[in-house]
Image (tube, grey):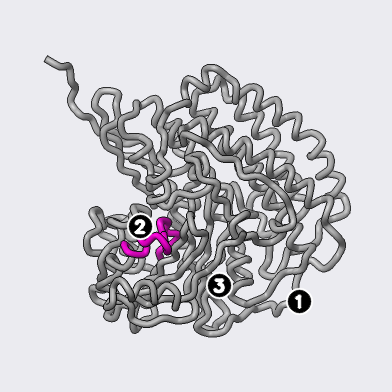
Amino acid sequence: MAVRALTGQEVAQRLEAALPDAVERWEPEVVWVHPGQISTACRFLRDDPELDFRFLSSLSAVDFIGHFDLVYHLTSLGRRHTAVVKARLYGRDTPSLPSVYPVWQGADFQEREVWDLMGVRFEGHPNLKRIMLWEGFEGHPLRKDFL
Amino acid sequence: MPFRTEPMTVNIGPQHPSTHGVFRLRVTFDGEVITEVEPVFGYLHRGTEKLAEERNYVQVVTLTDRLDYVSSMTNNQAYCIAVEKLLGVTPPLRAKYLRTLVAELQRIASHLIGVGFFLQELGTFGGTPLMYCFRSRERILDLFEMLCGARITVSYLRPGGVFSDAPADFWPALDAFMQVFPGELAELEQLVLENEILMVRTRGVSPLPLDVAVNCSVSGPVLRASGLAWDWRKEDPYDAYDQVRFEVPVGTNGDNYDRLWVRMQEVHQSLSIVRQCVAQIEPGPVRLDLPLVLRAEAGVEAYGRIESPRGELGFYLVSDGGISPYRCKIRSPSLLNLTVTEHLLVGWKLADMIVSLGSVDINMGEVDR
């Protein structure tokens, strides 16, 4: 049977029942989480037996100039479903949010990549340094204002 | 008094014949035993994601060839599936079969590289098994050349189908390959899988527990060798994978032997899929009639994923209504499979280091993008 994509509402309701102040809002396919709560929320998503998101498929950041969107694509290998979690960060100087490295070690290189290319900091990442570019490189090339 | 040595830090790479490209490992040894590992990469970083933002949707296909340059067809496939999700279109049935067919041929070619270099890194004499693998891979590249004129950077797939239908002489050539290759594969397997020296060198070496593999976002043959039958071709069938039957080989210990064994078994499954595609394919259009310059609606996004030879290859595309992707994030299986480097290497000896790294079968074009 094919993998099912959970709706934002399904994930949001389950998440809200356990962590009332984590969920910002939801869309048909996406659940928005307060950036400060992302690590706690992800830990719940991983450990909750019904959601069971033990596999972090992908962690991306998108620069919308006014804000950054952090996108987490999650997969449950046991329950065979997927979900998309997002968090929105405002400000371009030092955007930062808690690292999900303690939840999924698979976030290690991806968070370093987001820091390197997008300039978003992850609090609590044990080794947050540049990954593709060298230390001393100025700027973050995937930002829309980097030419 | 116990005997101990001073810890010594050594750089393996970036210029090293067995690092699968420009990959560097900073390794600290206590005598012969590895105590610390730090992978360093970025030497092949070309900014593919940034380049994609400057090109239109069809032009980006050529960039994807250059990611994992030993499996360009599957890179094309992942990207095209993501664009099709973004646009909400489905390619014609014949195109789906052609894509499945070339993807499986590519999987065979890529696994032959993976297996061949793994054996080379074990120190097999003079590279003989590697040449056995390359002999067969060459035949597949010849087939690709008939399809699209290129052997490595194929750009054969397009959003909405494939570039063009297979020429008439492709089918007899494919048939000839299907006649010859099983014999060559049997020969290779006989040389390798039951070889006593190989077993001693690989069985029980660098085992990867399943829970570690899952937590580290490991996918593909490395994950399956650790004992979980997770294959996106089965879990979320794309193209014609819901029309064909195949099995998902699974290892038990997740050691170097299992990773090798899983790849060899997958080659058999791929052969079976190719046979089924040839039997089932029917005449018809191979490409949707889409505009030359594609546009998706503003604010739409899509995550297209496939099972590439190395694992879950995903393209996350965001559109702002323009002619190029606003954001094109590539979820690279090679990069994420490297997360477990430390788990694989620490505690093992220098002689096993390159072998264990080879068993992960990374490709630097895809790691650094």
Q: Please tell me which residue is depicted at 49% across the width and 80% down the height of the picture.
A: A28
Q: Are discs 3 and 1 located on one and the same chain?
A: yes
Chain name for mark 3: B
Quadrant for residue B242, please give it. Answer: bottom right
Q: Please tell me which residue is depicted at 55% across the width and 72% down the height of the picture.
A: B55
**Mark 2 → mark 3, Cα distance in angstroms:** 29 Å
Q: Horizontally, is B56 left or right of B241 in the view? A: left
Q: Please tell me which residue is depicted at 75% across the width and 35% down the height of the picture.
A: B181
Classed neighbour count for the residue bearing mark 2: other residues with Cα under 10 Å, few (<14), some (14–19), many (≥20): many
Q: Tag 3: residue type?
A: Arg
Q: Earlier in the sequence, mark 3 or mark 1?
A: 3
Dot label at residue B289: 1
Please name the residue that numbered disc 3 is placed on: B55
Q: Are discs 2 and 3 located on one and the same chain?
A: no
Q: Horizontally, is B141 left or right of A50 in the view? A: right
Chain name for mark 1: B
- Residue B176 appears in the rendering: yes
Residue B53 image position (x, y, % from top left): 50, 72
